Amino acid sequence: MEFALLILGMMVVTYVTRYSMIVILGRWEVPRAVTLALTFVPMAAFAAIIAPEILLHKGEIALVNARFVAGLAAILVAAFTRRILLTIIVGMGTLWIVQAFLSP
């Protein structure tokens, strides 16, 4: 029963926060600068999630680790080809290969 109430509470909070923004923004004209700035929010959130995973190794910043090398390879492939599947394949392949060489 507690679990069901928890899920119901999360549903209500999610609905209220999203609906409130729709109501607020539906009444006023949103400035173009704000609309443009909001387009960068998903990329910024993604970078905030990915950057620590790529840059940190055992709690310290380390630019020579398997994840950093694989991330750099994936970024380069994505920048030049703009193909998601190829980017994932190259990134994961690079990660596995570098981990195989760096593992003791």
Image: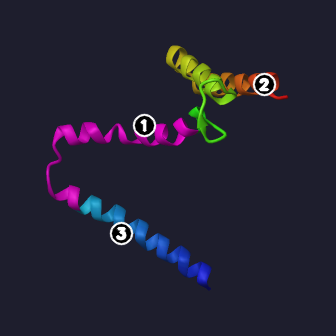
Q: Secondary structure at mark 3?
A: helix
Magenta region: 24-52
Q: Between marks 1 and 2, how big is the CA–CA gap?
A: 31 Å
The secondary structure making up most of the magenta span is: helix
User: In what quadrant of the picture does the C terminus appear?
Assistant: top right
Taking the view exactly as shown, the residue that stands out farthest to the right is 104
Q: Which residue is mark 2?
A: 102
Q: Between marks 3 and 2, how big is the CA–CA gap?
A: 49 Å
Rendered image quadrant of residue 84? top right
Instruction: Tell me if 2 is positioned left or right of 20 in this view.
Output: right
- Give coordinates of residue 82: x percent, y percent: 52, 20
Q: Quick one: label 1, few (<14), some, or many (20+) residues within 10 Å? A: few
Closer to the camera, 61 or 92? 61
Q: Nearer the viewer, mark 3 or mark 2?
A: 2
> Residue 16: which numbered mark, if any?
3
Position of 7 relative to 69 (above/below): below
First-in-chain label (1 vs 3): 3
First-in-chain label (1 vs 2): 1
Q: Between marks 1 and 3, how big is the CA–CA gap?
A: 25 Å
Q: Quick one: label 2, few (<14), some, or many (20+) residues within 10 Å? A: few
Q: Amino acid at mark 2?
A: Leu
Instruction: Tell me if 91 is positioned left or right of 75 in this view.
Output: right
First-in-chain label (3 vs 2): 3
Q: Amino acid at mark 3?
A: Val
